[in-house]
Amino acid sequence: MRTCARTGLALVAGPVAAYRVAKESYGPLNPQERGLLSDDRSQWYRFDTPGRTIYAAEDPKTAFLEALSWARMTASHAQYLKKTAAFFDESIEVIRQEVEEQWHANGHMAPGWIPANWRDGRLLYTLNFEEGHWVDISHADTLGALNGALGSLLYSIDVEDSLTLAEVTSGRREVTTVLGSWIREQILDDGSYPMGIRFPSKHGAVDKGHGYCWAFWLRRADIGLDDDPVSTDTGTGIKHNNPAYVFALNQHGIASR
């Protein structure tokens, strides 16, 4: 790690290899293009900016934790299932299946459930990035630089105190996308632009890893070229007993039938 003399941002080396779950029909390097910061950004991902951003994780378990987080069991839904099971003197699993069927019949996904065919058409890809500088969003130097450069703007979007990890790892897209967009446009002290942002998974580290994830900006694709400094394999299918997939299901309390 070193601190950029020009921007004050903490810079780190990128991953040797990183992992991404994506639909085969789109491929791992074809994310949805985002519009302007003035657009509704509530459905953007954490460090999306105008243009294209892809996300990858340091290991397959973290990749699946991120990819399946939308379907995780919520505390309120778990409590509802528990109370309903007690009222009807049934097992939680029986009640859970009945509730899932009702939600599905109404065209909705119940918390803590995904259909078995979620795996169909999705692959686990390995991405390799060329050398370049990545910004460590969780480093104190980066937080200090962002506070100094964006203090007034952050205050206007209700970050009333100093920017901390609480905001960086939050779901407040009106904050995180502004941070990503500002970082993306910075010229570093060696004349280069940042490759992207390294950030901690909000689901924590697994095994002996750090829980690192990376947001990578497809700058070249944004101007119609196909030579961004990243390569990918052809992907591997996701079997129902894939250890990383099963780990993520269990961690999130997700059932799949």
Image (spheres, rainbow, N blue to C red):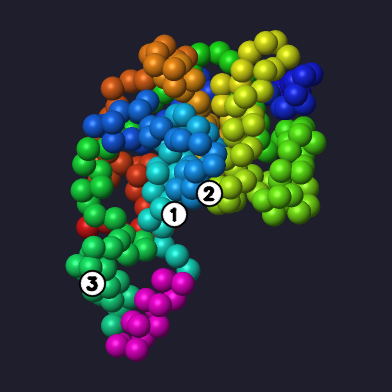
Does residue 81 belong to the magenta stretch?
A: yes
Q: Marks 3 and 2, Cα distance to the nearest angstrom? A: 29 Å
Crowd class of label 2 (few under 14; some 14 to 19; many from 20; radius 10 Å): few
Q: Is residue 57 visible?
A: no
251 up-or-down from 92: above or below: above
User: Residue 116: where, in percent of width, then height?
Assistant: 22, 51
Does residue 249 belong to the magenta stretch?
A: no
Query: Badge 1 is on which residue?
Result: 251
Crowd class of label 1 (few under 14; some 14 to 19; many from 20; radius 10 Å): some
Residue at (49, 47) in percent of width and height:
40
Q: Is residue 31 visible?
A: yes
Instruction: Tell me the SS state at disc 1.
Output: helix
Amino acid at dot 3: Gln
Q: Is residue 242 left or right of residue 59?
A: left
185 up-or-down from 146: above or below: above
Residue at (30, 41) in percent of width and height:
242
Query: Badge 3 is on which residue?
Result: 102
Instruction: Tell me the SS state at disc 2.
Output: loop
Residue at (58, 15) in percent of width and height:
132
Q: Earlier in the sequence, mark 1 or mark 3?
A: 3
User: Residue 169: where, in percent of width, then height?
Assistant: 60, 47
Query: Badge 2 is on which residue?
Result: 203
User: Residue 97: where, in percent of width, then height?
Assistant: 25, 70
Amino acid at dot 2: His
Q: Is residue 213 left or right of residue 60?
A: right
Q: Nearer the viewer, residue 65 or 163?
A: 163
Q: Marks 1 and 2, Cα distance to the nearest angstrom? A: 9 Å
Identify the mark at residue 148; answer none if there is no mark: none
86 up-or-down from 193: above or below: below
The label nearer to you, 1 versus 3, is 3
